[in-house]
Image (cartoon, grey):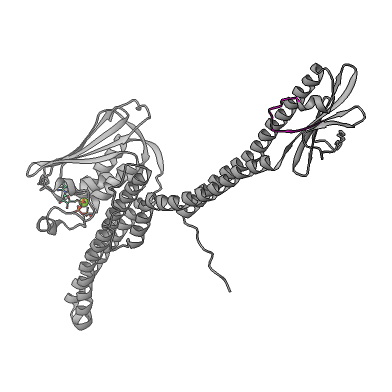
Amino acid sequence: MLTKRRRLSISRRLTLTYSLILFSILFVFTILTFFGTGYYIMELNLFELETCAGIISDYISNAPRVDQVSFKDMNLSYSVLYSIFDKDRKLIYSNMPDIPFLEITRAGNRKLMGDVGVKRRQGIIYINKQVNIKGTTYYIQTAKGFADIAQSTYVLPRILLVTTVLGTLVSYISGSILSKRLLKPIYDISKTAKEITSKSLDKRIPVDGPDDELKDLADTFNTMIGRLETEFGKQIRFVSDVSHELRTPLSIMHGHVNMLSRWGKDDPQVLEKSLATLKAETENMNKLIENMLYLAKGDNNALILQKEDFSLCLLLREITEETHLTHNQYSISYQCEDNLVINADYNALKQLLRILIDNSIKFSKPPGEISILVRKEAGAAVITVSDKGMGIPRESLPYVFDRFYRVDESRNKATGGAGLGLPIAKQIAQSHGGTLSAESEEGKGTKMIISIPRDKEEMHGTS
Ligand SMILES: Nc1ncnc2c1ncn2[C@@H]1O[C@H](COP(=O)(O)OP(=O)(O)OP(=O)(O)O)[C@@H](O)[C@H]1O
Ligand SMILES: [Mg+2]
Protein backbone atom coordinates (compact mmCIF):
# COMPACT_ATOMS: atom_id res chain seq x y z
CA MET A 1 0.00 0.00 0.00
CA LEU A 2 1.28 3.45 -0.87
CA THR A 3 1.86 5.69 2.12
CA LYS A 4 1.74 9.44 1.62
CA ARG A 5 5.16 11.02 2.15
CA ARG A 6 5.08 13.56 4.93
CA ARG A 7 5.63 17.05 3.57
CA LEU A 8 8.21 19.25 5.26
CA SER A 9 7.05 22.86 5.31
CA ILE A 10 9.49 25.66 4.36
CA SER A 11 9.34 26.99 7.91
CA ARG A 12 10.27 23.59 9.38
CA ARG A 13 13.01 23.07 6.79
CA LEU A 14 14.49 26.51 7.50
CA THR A 15 14.38 25.97 11.25
CA LEU A 16 15.86 22.48 11.01
CA THR A 17 18.65 23.61 8.68
CA TYR A 18 19.64 26.56 10.83
CA SER A 19 19.42 24.56 14.07
CA LEU A 20 21.62 21.89 12.50
CA ILE A 21 24.15 24.49 11.36
CA LEU A 22 24.17 26.06 14.83
CA PHE A 23 24.55 22.64 16.46
CA SER A 24 27.47 21.73 14.17
CA ILE A 25 29.25 25.03 14.87
CA LEU A 26 28.80 24.71 18.64
CA PHE A 27 29.79 21.03 18.55
CA VAL A 28 33.01 21.69 16.62
CA PHE A 29 33.70 24.56 19.02
CA THR A 30 33.24 22.18 21.99
CA ILE A 31 35.56 19.56 20.51
CA LEU A 32 38.22 22.20 19.76
CA THR A 33 37.85 23.61 23.26
CA PHE A 34 38.20 20.10 24.73
CA PHE A 35 41.43 19.29 22.94
CA GLY A 36 42.74 22.86 22.99
CA THR A 37 42.29 23.32 26.75
CA GLY A 38 43.72 19.86 27.44
CA TYR A 39 46.79 20.63 25.37
CA TYR A 40 47.23 24.07 26.89
CA ILE A 41 46.92 22.89 30.51
CA MET A 42 49.30 19.99 29.84
CA GLU A 43 51.84 22.43 28.37
CA LEU A 44 51.51 24.69 31.45
CA ASN A 45 52.13 21.73 33.75
CA LEU A 46 55.08 20.49 31.75
CA PHE A 47 56.50 23.98 31.91
CA GLU A 48 56.06 23.94 35.70
CA LEU A 49 57.76 20.54 35.99
CA GLU A 50 60.64 21.66 33.79
CA THR A 51 61.08 24.90 35.72
CA CYS A 52 61.20 22.84 38.88
CA ALA A 53 63.82 20.50 37.41
CA GLY A 54 65.83 23.57 36.36
CA ILE A 55 65.72 25.01 39.89
CA ILE A 56 66.89 21.67 41.32
CA SER A 57 69.67 21.52 38.74
CA ASP A 58 70.81 25.06 39.73
CA TYR A 59 70.63 24.06 43.36
CA ILE A 60 72.87 21.03 42.73
CA SER A 61 75.40 23.20 40.83
CA ASN A 62 75.67 25.62 43.72
CA ALA A 63 75.42 23.14 46.64
CA PRO A 64 78.75 22.31 48.34
CA ARG A 65 77.71 18.67 48.56
CA VAL A 66 75.03 16.52 47.00
CA ASP A 67 73.35 14.17 49.51
CA GLN A 68 70.11 13.56 51.45
CA VAL A 69 70.87 16.14 54.11
CA SER A 70 71.68 18.94 51.73
CA PHE A 71 68.41 18.51 49.87
CA LYS A 72 66.43 18.85 53.06
CA ASP A 73 67.57 22.49 53.13
CA MET A 74 66.38 23.07 49.62
CA ASN A 75 63.41 25.34 49.77
CA LEU A 76 61.37 24.41 46.71
CA SER A 77 58.11 26.25 46.79
CA TYR A 78 56.51 24.31 43.90
CA SER A 79 53.88 21.73 44.76
CA VAL A 80 55.53 19.03 42.74
CA LEU A 81 57.02 15.67 43.58
CA TYR A 82 60.68 15.41 42.80
CA SER A 83 63.50 12.86 43.05
CA ILE A 84 67.19 13.14 42.32
CA PHE A 85 69.10 10.05 41.13
CA ASP A 86 72.85 9.61 40.63
CA LYS A 87 74.37 8.37 37.39
CA ASP A 88 73.64 4.72 38.44
CA ARG A 89 69.94 5.56 38.88
CA LYS A 90 70.34 5.27 42.64
CA LEU A 91 68.01 7.56 44.60
CA ILE A 92 69.84 10.42 46.30
CA TYR A 93 66.78 12.30 47.51
CA SER A 94 63.00 12.32 46.96
CA ASN A 95 60.14 14.25 48.58
CA MET A 96 58.06 11.13 47.97
CA PRO A 97 60.28 8.13 48.57
CA ASP A 98 58.18 5.49 46.76
CA ILE A 99 58.80 6.91 43.36
CA PRO A 100 60.94 4.59 41.28
CA PHE A 101 63.31 5.73 38.57
CA LEU A 102 61.39 5.80 35.37
CA GLU A 103 63.52 5.03 32.42
CA ILE A 104 62.39 7.26 29.67
CA THR A 105 62.97 5.98 26.21
CA ARG A 106 62.05 7.71 23.00
CA ALA A 107 59.53 5.03 21.97
CA GLY A 108 57.45 5.17 25.12
CA ASN A 109 57.60 8.92 25.51
CA ARG A 110 54.94 11.36 24.75
CA LYS A 111 57.67 13.75 23.83
CA LEU A 112 61.38 14.10 24.21
CA MET A 113 62.97 17.51 24.24
CA GLY A 114 66.73 17.38 24.29
CA ASP A 115 67.71 15.59 27.49
CA VAL A 116 64.20 15.83 29.00
CA GLY A 117 61.79 12.89 28.76
CA VAL A 118 58.08 13.04 29.50
CA LYS A 119 55.91 10.15 30.56
CA ARG A 120 52.38 9.62 31.85
CA ARG A 121 51.76 6.76 34.22
CA GLN A 122 48.88 5.89 36.57
CA GLY A 123 47.47 9.40 36.69
CA ILE A 124 50.90 11.00 37.17
CA ILE A 125 52.91 12.99 34.66
CA TYR A 126 56.69 12.77 34.94
CA ILE A 127 59.56 14.48 33.38
CA ASN A 128 63.09 13.20 33.66
CA LYS A 129 65.95 15.57 33.09
CA GLN A 130 69.53 14.39 32.75
CA VAL A 131 72.05 16.99 33.97
CA ASN A 132 75.81 17.03 34.05
CA ILE A 133 77.19 18.95 36.99
CA LYS A 134 80.91 19.23 37.70
CA GLY A 135 81.63 16.12 35.68
CA THR A 136 78.92 14.01 37.37
CA THR A 137 75.64 12.89 35.80
CA TYR A 138 72.39 13.31 37.75
CA TYR A 139 68.80 12.55 36.86
CA ILE A 140 66.23 14.97 38.14
CA GLN A 141 62.73 13.59 38.02
CA THR A 142 59.72 15.85 38.70
CA ALA A 143 56.10 14.68 38.72
CA LYS A 144 52.58 15.92 39.23
CA GLY A 145 49.18 14.27 39.69
CA PHE A 146 47.45 14.13 36.34
CA ALA A 147 43.89 13.71 37.71
CA ASP A 148 43.49 17.45 38.51
CA ILE A 149 44.54 18.36 35.00
CA ALA A 150 42.19 15.81 33.49
CA GLN A 151 39.28 17.04 35.55
CA SER A 152 39.82 20.64 34.63
CA THR A 153 39.94 19.71 30.94
CA TYR A 154 36.69 17.73 31.22
CA VAL A 155 34.46 20.18 33.08
CA LEU A 156 34.55 22.96 30.49
CA PRO A 157 33.64 20.78 27.47
CA ARG A 158 30.80 19.25 29.45
CA ILE A 159 29.40 22.65 30.22
CA LEU A 160 29.83 23.57 26.55
CA LEU A 161 28.12 20.38 25.40
CA VAL A 162 25.09 21.06 27.59
CA THR A 163 25.04 24.67 26.32
CA THR A 164 25.22 23.37 22.73
CA VAL A 165 22.21 21.09 23.19
CA LEU A 166 20.23 23.73 25.06
CA GLY A 167 21.22 26.45 22.54
CA THR A 168 20.15 24.27 19.62
CA LEU A 169 16.83 23.55 21.30
CA VAL A 170 16.14 27.21 22.05
CA SER A 171 17.17 28.14 18.48
CA TYR A 172 14.83 25.46 17.05
CA ILE A 173 11.83 26.58 19.11
CA SER A 174 12.35 30.32 18.56
CA GLY A 175 13.22 29.68 14.88
CA SER A 176 10.01 27.79 14.22
CA ILE A 177 7.90 30.49 15.92
CA LEU A 178 9.70 33.27 14.04
CA SER A 179 9.69 31.57 10.63
CA LYS A 180 5.96 30.80 10.96
CA ARG A 181 5.32 34.45 11.68
CA LEU A 182 7.57 35.63 8.82
CA LEU A 183 6.06 33.20 6.33
CA LYS A 184 2.47 34.02 7.27
CA PRO A 185 1.95 36.11 4.08
CA ILE A 186 2.78 32.98 2.03
CA TYR A 187 0.13 30.98 3.90
CA ASP A 188 -2.29 33.87 3.28
CA ILE A 189 -1.50 33.85 -0.46
CA SER A 190 -1.98 30.10 -0.63
CA LYS A 191 -5.25 30.30 1.34
CA THR A 192 -6.62 33.09 -0.88
CA ALA A 193 -5.50 31.25 -4.04
CA LYS A 194 -7.42 28.18 -2.89
CA GLU A 195 -10.53 30.26 -2.24
CA ILE A 196 -10.43 31.93 -5.66
CA THR A 197 -12.69 30.42 -8.26
CA SER A 198 -14.17 31.92 -11.43
CA LYS A 199 -17.00 33.23 -9.25
CA SER A 200 -14.86 34.86 -6.59
CA LEU A 201 -12.22 36.67 -8.62
CA ASP A 202 -12.85 39.79 -6.53
CA LYS A 203 -10.89 38.32 -3.58
CA ARG A 204 -7.53 39.93 -2.73
CA ILE A 205 -4.69 39.18 -0.34
CA PRO A 206 -4.31 41.68 2.52
CA VAL A 207 -1.07 43.64 1.96
CA ASP A 208 -0.76 45.53 5.23
CA GLY A 209 2.52 43.91 6.44
CA PRO A 210 6.04 45.33 6.22
CA ASP A 211 7.35 46.52 2.86
CA ASP A 212 9.39 43.45 1.88
CA GLU A 213 9.66 40.74 -0.81
CA LEU A 214 6.56 38.95 0.50
CA LYS A 215 4.55 42.16 0.17
CA ASP A 216 5.84 42.40 -3.44
CA LEU A 217 4.69 38.82 -3.99
CA ALA A 218 1.23 39.58 -2.57
CA ASP A 219 1.02 42.74 -4.72
CA THR A 220 2.01 40.79 -7.84
CA PHE A 221 -0.55 38.11 -7.03
CA ASN A 222 -3.28 40.73 -6.51
CA THR A 223 -2.38 42.45 -9.81
CA MET A 224 -2.52 39.09 -11.58
CA ILE A 225 -5.95 38.31 -10.10
CA GLY A 226 -7.07 41.82 -11.10
CA ARG A 227 -6.03 41.19 -14.70
CA LEU A 228 -7.72 37.79 -14.66
CA GLU A 229 -10.89 39.39 -13.31
CA THR A 230 -10.89 41.99 -16.12
CA GLU A 231 -10.17 39.44 -18.83
CA PHE A 232 -12.68 36.98 -17.41
CA GLY A 233 -15.30 39.74 -17.27
CA LYS A 234 -14.58 40.58 -20.94
CA GLN A 235 -14.97 36.93 -21.91
CA ILE A 236 -18.28 36.62 -20.07
CA ARG A 237 -19.55 39.83 -21.72
CA PHE A 238 -18.36 38.62 -25.11
CA VAL A 239 -20.09 35.25 -24.75
CA SER A 240 -23.35 36.86 -23.58
CA ASP A 241 -23.17 39.41 -26.43
CA VAL A 242 -22.56 36.63 -28.94
CA SER A 243 -25.50 34.60 -27.70
CA HIS A 244 -27.66 37.70 -27.74
CA GLU A 245 -26.62 38.56 -31.30
CA LEU A 246 -27.27 35.03 -32.49
CA ARG A 247 -30.61 34.74 -30.72
CA THR A 248 -32.31 37.47 -32.84
CA PRO A 249 -31.57 36.00 -36.31
CA LEU A 250 -32.23 32.49 -35.01
CA SER A 251 -35.67 33.41 -33.69
CA ILE A 252 -36.48 35.19 -36.97
CA MET A 253 -35.39 32.10 -38.89
CA HIS A 254 -37.36 29.87 -36.55
CA GLY A 255 -40.50 31.98 -37.15
CA HIS A 256 -40.11 31.78 -40.90
CA VAL A 257 -39.47 28.04 -40.87
CA ASN A 258 -42.69 27.63 -38.85
CA MET A 259 -44.54 29.83 -41.29
CA LEU A 260 -43.17 27.83 -44.21
CA SER A 261 -44.21 24.52 -42.71
CA ARG A 262 -47.77 25.79 -42.10
CA TRP A 263 -48.59 27.85 -45.15
CA GLY A 264 -45.45 28.22 -47.25
CA LYS A 265 -46.16 25.12 -49.34
CA ASP A 266 -49.47 26.52 -50.59
CA ASP A 267 -48.77 30.25 -50.64
CA PRO A 268 -46.03 31.20 -53.12
CA GLN A 269 -45.90 34.76 -51.71
CA VAL A 270 -45.14 33.51 -48.18
CA LEU A 271 -42.69 31.01 -49.59
CA GLU A 272 -40.75 33.66 -51.48
CA LYS A 273 -40.71 36.16 -48.61
CA SER A 274 -39.64 33.57 -46.05
CA LEU A 275 -36.93 32.16 -48.26
CA ALA A 276 -35.57 35.68 -48.90
CA THR A 277 -35.56 36.41 -45.15
CA LEU A 278 -33.92 33.09 -44.34
CA LYS A 279 -31.25 33.80 -46.94
CA ALA A 280 -30.59 37.29 -45.58
CA GLU A 281 -30.47 36.08 -41.98
CA THR A 282 -28.11 33.21 -42.78
CA GLU A 283 -25.85 35.67 -44.57
CA ASN A 284 -25.95 37.96 -41.51
CA MET A 285 -25.14 35.10 -39.19
CA ASN A 286 -22.38 33.96 -41.46
CA LYS A 287 -20.81 37.42 -41.46
CA LEU A 288 -21.22 37.70 -37.68
CA ILE A 289 -19.53 34.36 -37.07
CA GLU A 290 -16.75 35.19 -39.51
CA ASN A 291 -16.13 38.48 -37.72
CA MET A 292 -16.11 36.81 -34.34
CA LEU A 293 -13.67 34.19 -35.54
CA TYR A 294 -11.43 36.92 -36.93
CA LEU A 295 -11.41 38.70 -33.55
CA ALA A 296 -10.82 35.43 -31.68
CA LYS A 297 -7.82 34.73 -33.94
CA GLY A 298 -6.40 38.13 -33.04
CA ASP A 299 -6.96 37.41 -29.34
CA ASN A 300 -5.03 34.18 -29.64
CA ASN A 301 -2.26 35.85 -31.66
CA ALA A 302 -3.12 33.50 -34.52
CA LEU A 303 -3.51 36.20 -37.18
CA ILE A 304 -0.97 35.62 -39.91
CA LEU A 305 -0.14 38.73 -41.91
CA GLN A 306 1.09 38.38 -45.45
CA LYS A 307 3.16 41.49 -45.68
CA GLU A 308 4.36 42.94 -48.95
CA ASP A 309 5.52 46.29 -50.28
CA PHE A 310 2.79 48.19 -52.09
CA SER A 311 1.77 51.72 -52.94
CA LEU A 312 -0.91 53.09 -50.61
CA CYS A 313 -2.20 55.33 -53.39
CA LEU A 314 -2.86 52.32 -55.59
CA LEU A 315 -4.84 50.68 -52.76
CA LEU A 316 -6.88 53.86 -52.28
CA ARG A 317 -7.59 54.10 -55.97
CA GLU A 318 -8.85 50.52 -56.05
CA ILE A 319 -11.08 50.92 -53.00
CA THR A 320 -12.62 54.23 -54.10
CA GLU A 321 -13.38 52.78 -57.53
CA GLU A 322 -15.11 49.78 -55.91
CA THR A 323 -17.13 52.09 -53.64
CA HIS A 324 -18.20 54.20 -56.66
CA LEU A 325 -19.56 51.05 -58.23
CA THR A 326 -21.48 49.84 -55.20
CA HIS A 327 -22.60 53.19 -53.73
CA ASN A 328 -22.70 55.57 -56.65
CA GLN A 329 -24.98 58.04 -54.83
CA TYR A 330 -22.10 58.80 -52.39
CA SER A 331 -19.18 61.06 -53.13
CA ILE A 332 -15.84 59.57 -52.21
CA SER A 333 -12.45 61.07 -52.95
CA TYR A 334 -8.86 60.48 -51.92
CA GLN A 335 -5.70 62.46 -51.78
CA CYS A 336 -2.23 61.01 -51.66
CA GLU A 337 0.49 63.36 -50.48
CA ASP A 338 3.12 61.34 -52.25
CA ASN A 339 3.20 57.93 -53.77
CA LEU A 340 3.77 56.16 -50.47
CA VAL A 341 5.03 52.59 -50.23
CA ILE A 342 4.28 50.65 -47.12
CA ASN A 343 5.05 47.12 -46.04
CA ALA A 344 1.76 45.61 -44.91
CA ASP A 345 -0.86 42.94 -45.55
CA TYR A 346 -2.69 44.35 -48.61
CA ASN A 347 -5.99 42.49 -48.05
CA ALA A 348 -6.08 43.25 -44.31
CA LEU A 349 -5.51 46.96 -44.93
CA LYS A 350 -8.18 46.96 -47.62
CA GLN A 351 -10.60 45.33 -45.14
CA LEU A 352 -9.74 48.01 -42.55
CA LEU A 353 -10.49 50.83 -45.03
CA ARG A 354 -13.67 49.08 -46.15
CA ILE A 355 -14.95 48.94 -42.54
CA LEU A 356 -14.35 52.70 -42.13
CA ILE A 357 -15.87 53.61 -45.52
CA ASP A 358 -18.81 51.30 -44.81
CA ASN A 359 -19.45 53.16 -41.52
CA SER A 360 -19.15 56.56 -43.21
CA ILE A 361 -21.71 55.46 -45.80
CA LYS A 362 -24.02 53.92 -43.16
CA PHE A 363 -23.99 56.95 -40.91
CA SER A 364 -24.18 59.74 -43.53
CA LYS A 365 -26.91 60.77 -45.91
CA PRO A 366 -26.01 60.77 -49.63
CA PRO A 367 -23.82 62.23 -51.08
CA GLY A 368 -21.91 61.86 -47.78
CA GLU A 369 -18.70 63.57 -48.89
CA ILE A 370 -16.29 60.93 -47.77
CA SER A 371 -12.66 61.94 -48.14
CA ILE A 372 -9.51 59.94 -47.59
CA LEU A 373 -6.26 61.68 -46.95
CA VAL A 374 -2.82 60.09 -46.79
CA ARG A 375 0.22 61.86 -45.40
CA LYS A 376 3.70 60.95 -44.29
CA GLU A 377 4.78 61.36 -40.72
CA ALA A 378 8.06 60.46 -39.04
CA GLY A 379 8.28 56.70 -39.51
CA ALA A 380 4.57 56.26 -40.27
CA ALA A 381 1.92 56.57 -42.94
CA VAL A 382 -1.20 58.30 -41.63
CA ILE A 383 -4.55 57.71 -43.36
CA THR A 384 -7.63 59.69 -42.32
CA VAL A 385 -11.13 58.73 -43.43
CA SER A 386 -13.54 61.64 -42.85
CA ASP A 387 -17.24 62.04 -43.43
CA LYS A 388 -19.81 64.73 -42.79
CA GLY A 389 -22.38 62.35 -41.38
CA MET A 390 -24.26 62.23 -38.10
CA GLY A 391 -21.11 61.94 -35.96
CA ILE A 392 -20.69 60.20 -32.64
CA PRO A 393 -21.82 61.71 -29.32
CA ARG A 394 -18.90 62.71 -27.09
CA GLU A 395 -19.94 60.27 -24.32
CA SER A 396 -20.03 57.33 -26.78
CA LEU A 397 -16.68 58.07 -28.43
CA PRO A 398 -14.54 56.11 -25.91
CA TYR A 399 -16.59 52.95 -26.48
CA VAL A 400 -16.89 52.75 -30.27
CA PHE A 401 -13.94 50.31 -30.45
CA ASP A 402 -15.53 47.93 -27.89
CA ARG A 403 -16.97 44.72 -29.25
CA PHE A 404 -20.71 44.83 -29.99
CA TYR A 405 -20.91 48.51 -29.10
CA ARG A 406 -23.35 50.58 -31.14
CA VAL A 407 -24.13 54.18 -30.29
CA ASP A 408 -27.83 53.70 -29.90
CA GLU A 409 -30.10 50.93 -31.00
CA SER A 410 -32.69 53.23 -32.63
CA ARG A 411 -30.24 54.82 -35.07
CA ASN A 412 -28.67 51.46 -35.82
CA LYS A 413 -31.89 49.59 -36.51
CA ALA A 414 -31.97 50.87 -40.06
CA THR A 415 -28.27 50.37 -40.71
CA GLY A 416 -27.97 46.89 -39.18
CA GLY A 417 -24.55 45.66 -38.10
CA ALA A 418 -23.33 43.96 -35.00
CA GLY A 419 -20.83 46.47 -33.67
CA LEU A 420 -17.81 44.39 -34.67
CA GLY A 421 -16.50 46.57 -37.53
CA LEU A 422 -14.40 49.04 -35.51
CA PRO A 423 -12.94 46.39 -33.13
CA ILE A 424 -11.79 44.42 -36.19
CA ALA A 425 -10.40 47.58 -37.82
CA LYS A 426 -8.48 48.41 -34.64
CA GLN A 427 -7.16 44.86 -34.42
CA ILE A 428 -5.84 45.07 -38.00
CA ALA A 429 -4.08 48.39 -37.28
CA GLN A 430 -2.57 46.98 -34.08
CA SER A 431 -1.44 43.76 -35.73
CA HIS A 432 0.66 45.99 -38.02
CA GLY A 433 2.11 47.75 -34.97
CA GLY A 434 -0.07 50.78 -35.73
CA THR A 435 -3.04 52.59 -34.17
CA LEU A 436 -6.61 53.56 -34.97
CA SER A 437 -8.35 56.47 -33.27
CA ALA A 438 -11.56 58.44 -33.73
CA GLU A 439 -12.44 62.12 -33.64
CA SER A 440 -16.06 63.11 -34.01
CA GLU A 441 -18.60 65.80 -33.38
CA GLU A 442 -22.25 64.92 -33.26
CA GLY A 443 -24.13 66.30 -36.25
CA LYS A 444 -20.93 67.40 -38.00
CA GLY A 445 -19.05 64.31 -38.96
CA THR A 446 -16.42 61.78 -38.02
CA LYS A 447 -12.72 61.40 -38.67
CA MET A 448 -10.99 58.02 -38.29
CA ILE A 449 -7.20 58.15 -38.11
CA ILE A 450 -5.04 55.14 -38.98
CA SER A 451 -1.30 55.21 -38.41
CA ILE A 452 0.84 52.42 -39.87
CA PRO A 453 4.59 52.30 -39.14
CA ARG A 454 6.73 52.60 -42.23
CA ASP A 455 10.43 52.13 -42.68
CA LYS A 456 10.59 52.03 -46.50
CA GLU A 457 11.54 55.13 -48.41
CA GLU A 458 8.78 56.53 -50.61
CA MET A 459 8.47 55.69 -54.25
CA HIS A 460 8.83 58.60 -56.63
CA GLY A 461 5.86 59.63 -58.70
CA THR A 462 2.41 61.10 -58.15
CA SER A 463 -1.06 59.72 -57.58
N1 LIG B 1 -18.47 57.23 -39.36
C1 LIG B 1 -19.34 57.10 -38.34
N2 LIG B 1 -20.28 58.03 -38.12
C2 LIG B 1 -21.15 57.91 -37.11
N3 LIG B 1 -21.16 56.90 -36.21
C3 LIG B 1 -20.22 55.94 -36.38
C4 LIG B 1 -19.28 55.98 -37.44
N4 LIG B 1 -18.49 54.89 -37.34
C5 LIG B 1 -18.93 54.21 -36.28
N5 LIG B 1 -19.98 54.82 -35.71
C6 LIG B 1 -20.71 54.38 -34.49
O1 LIG B 1 -19.90 53.41 -33.83
C7 LIG B 1 -20.62 52.18 -33.73
C8 LIG B 1 -19.69 51.03 -33.86
O2 LIG B 1 -19.23 50.88 -35.19
P1 LIG B 1 -18.90 49.46 -35.76
O3 LIG B 1 -18.39 49.62 -37.14
O4 LIG B 1 -18.06 48.79 -34.80
O5 LIG B 1 -20.28 48.72 -35.74
P2 LIG B 1 -21.50 48.74 -36.77
O6 LIG B 1 -21.08 49.53 -37.96
O7 LIG B 1 -22.69 49.19 -36.02
O8 LIG B 1 -21.67 47.23 -37.10
P3 LIG B 1 -20.75 46.32 -38.05
O9 LIG B 1 -19.60 47.18 -38.45
O10 LIG B 1 -20.41 45.16 -37.25
O11 LIG B 1 -21.62 46.00 -39.23
C9 LIG B 1 -21.66 52.24 -34.80
O12 LIG B 1 -22.78 51.47 -34.46
C10 LIG B 1 -22.00 53.70 -34.85
O13 LIG B 1 -22.97 54.02 -33.86
MG1 LIG C 1 -19.34 49.13 -38.98
Residue visible at 81% across and 37% down in the picture: 97
Task: Find residue 321 and report its horizontal and vertical position in percent.
Answer: 25, 43
- Screen quadrant of the C terminus: top left
Indicate left or right for 386 with 40 as reference: left
Judging depth in this view, the residue of 424 and 30 nearest the camera is 30
Q: Is residue 351 magenta?
A: no
Indicate left or right for 8 with 325 as reference: right
Can the viewer see residue 276?
Answer: no
Task: Find residue 462 and report its horizontal and vertical position in percent.
Answer: 29, 27
Tell me if residue 62 comes above or below residue 434 in the rendering. Answer: above
Tell me if residue 33 comes above or below residue 62 in the rendering. Answer: below
- Screen quadrant of the N terminus: bottom right
Residue visible at 26% across and 56% down in the picture: 234
Task: Find residue 327 and report its horizontal and vertical position in percent.
Answer: 19, 49
Judging depth in this view, the residue of 321 and 171 nearest the camera is 171
Magenta region, residue range: 73-83
Tell me if residue 155 comes above or below residue 115 in the rendering. Answer: below
Task: Find residue 77 and report its horizontal and vertical position in percent.
Answer: 68, 27
